[in-house]
Image: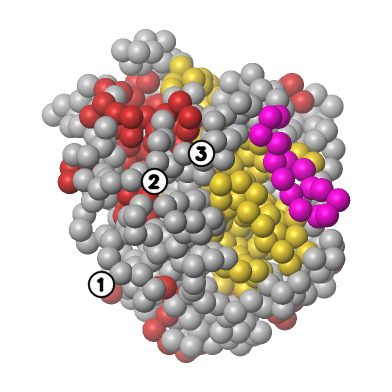
Amino acid sequence: MDTHDTSFATRSQAFEASEDTGRNPSTRPTIGDVIGARFGRRSMLRGSLAVTAMSAIGGAALLGSTSRGALAQAASFNFEELTAGVDETHHVAAGYTADVLIRWGDPVLPGAPAFDVQNQTAAAQAQQFGYNCDWIGFYPLPAGSDAADHGLLAVNHEYTIPELMFPGNLPGEDFANMTQEHVDIELAAHGLSLVEVRRGADGAWSYDPESQYNRRITGTTEMMLTGPVAGHDRVKTSADPSGTRVLGMLNNCAGGVTPWGTILTAEENFHGYFGGTLPEGHAETRNYERLGLPGGWYAWSRFHDRFDVGAEPNEGNRFGYMVEFDPYDPQSVPLKRTAMGRFKHEGANVTIDASGHAVAYSGDDERFDYVYRFISAGTYDPSDRAANMTLLEEGTLSVARFNEDGTVDWLPLVHGQGPLTAENGFNSQADVLIETRVAADLVGATPMDRPEDIDIRAQDGRVFIMLTNNTRRTAEQVDAANPRADNAYGHIFEIITDNDHMADRSRWEILVRCGDPANPEHDAVWGSETTENGWFGAPDNCAVDSRGRLWVTTDGNNFEYSGRTDGVWAMETEGELRGTSRHFFRVPVGAEMCGPFFTADDTTLFVAVQHPGDGASGWPGHEGDVTFDNPPTRWPDFQDGMPPRPSVVTIVKDDGGPIGV
């Protein structure tokens, strides 16, 4: 879609609209249909905060079970709930301190220049902290330890907003005011930053701009394709006839820390960076249409042929993967793990099954797309880190089918099985992985309501899935079996594995249906103690702390939508309070709440404040277009001439203890 469509006030709103567009032609029942089929008879419970409503959704299991009894008493929070609202700065619950650790433009590499917002260059940006920080991962130092006060912080940089980044009237109609230098700065502002961080005796965190570990991965960093797609004809280009070497990673959203201590980072809306027109009748037409490629959101194809699908029709097949590299090795080459599939990955968290296989869950963040599971061919060896480094190179990718009886089946995406044959355009496993979405359509996966972040609770193997929303579901798609049309507020889903991640079939439940429980039109269902500050919409990222407690962050919980900003909420998942949510942290106006990540002892929570100021539509405190010269907030610097800056924030308890305890 065109991010300069005048129906959207900001670029972030345009990104959200694209994710909500939906390009799945499947006619299978949506997840809403399946939920409704199970629970439609409970419709009289709409808007209820009562625990009986939660029982209606999940049965007795939602109230706790003997298999989870040990967790039921531990999964509770002790903090004074924050008041929901909206203003120009951030806020945290009483008894906690939230400090900015690093901001867009801060020096990352040794010798990097100081940030000069009026005189930006691509060379400087490639050495400085990138834009729009999303996923965060903490890697203790020394490697292999459980250190909670010293480590390496990895931070994704998802996308750029030229309207807020650059002085002047940018990008202009049809990108007319964008120059190659602007585009090259944007390329350098993408990717990932890695910085060494340390907590001082006073409890405050700082980063070392001269550390030998610090790195900037950008849109031009050389990396390699691995697995079945590497070297295939469909990823060969004029610049890379081998089909193995790629410049950069794009739109890195969420990610994961592998059990062997590597960074796993996801390429999500990569389609938006491409322009041009694919030649009529080209072999990639089906593939690209299913992904919405080219999106034409940026001016990049005007200056770099590789982003013009007419000039380089295979370049788009080189993006949309999970990328892995070693944070402890400054020379580690980022590797695109094609065996894990190509789609709009929100992220991937990895666990080790009892069998020893590495298992990763990942969502494809678009309306009516799917949830995936990858199982490594090899097994994990806790004494051989080098051997573990190849676990994600080969394995079996499956996609979820959620059944009306509360079970989930994992459908393998393997060439030659079922419809994944030459008759349907799949001549190899590489074809299946390049066109993962089409393959999932054909095997009969369940279309979901924008599956975003997925995390795994180690204690019982429960998998938490954030389903952000689905505003494209119409009333005509709803029947007695469908709980919500125009699902603007989303769900939080669970897969119950009982720590058997290899099983072909598991069970599923709903934790909450998001939205305002005081508004019957939202059809929201929460736990019994959720207050007017505790509800939210648009669940996006999540984290499970060492105690097994779930923390949720939101994307799109803006002023017009909810009368409040995005933030962090603590979510009860066990016992009589199951589904009860409490507000802990909130961002400045227009920002999205990303991250979150805890140190091993839960004494620090790292969060990322993305695109501050860019989602201020309807806020009385701002008039006119959101631009560099007219931002609704100048967080975190609050200096004239300095626009808002995406930043990482550290949250610690004032007494130094574990957060939420």
Q: Residue at x 28, y 46 (%)?
A: 168
Q: Which residue is mark 3?
A: 115
Among numbered discs 3 and 2, the one appearing first in the sequence: 3
Q: Is disc 3 in contact with disc 1, using a CB cutoff of under 8 Å?
A: no
Q: Which residue is mark 2?
A: 165
Inspect the magenta stretch and tell me whether residue 199 lies in it. yes
Q: Quadrant location of residue 263?
A: top right
Please tell me which residue lies in front, 569 or 628: 628
Task: Say which residue label 1 marks.
Answer: 476
> From this viewpoint, is residue 206 visible?
yes
Residue 186 lies within the magenta run = no
- Residue situated in front as seen by the camera: 489 or 613: 613
* On screen, residue 36 above or below 393: below
Graded by Cα atoms within 10 Å as few (under 14), some (14 to 19) or many (20 or more), the crowding at tag 3 reads: some
Q: Residue furthest top?
A: 241
Residue 288 visible: no
The residue drawn where x is 57% and y is 65% is: 90
Q: Which residues are magenta?
A: 196-211
Element carrying mark 3? loop
Mark 3 or 1 closer to N-term? Answer: 3
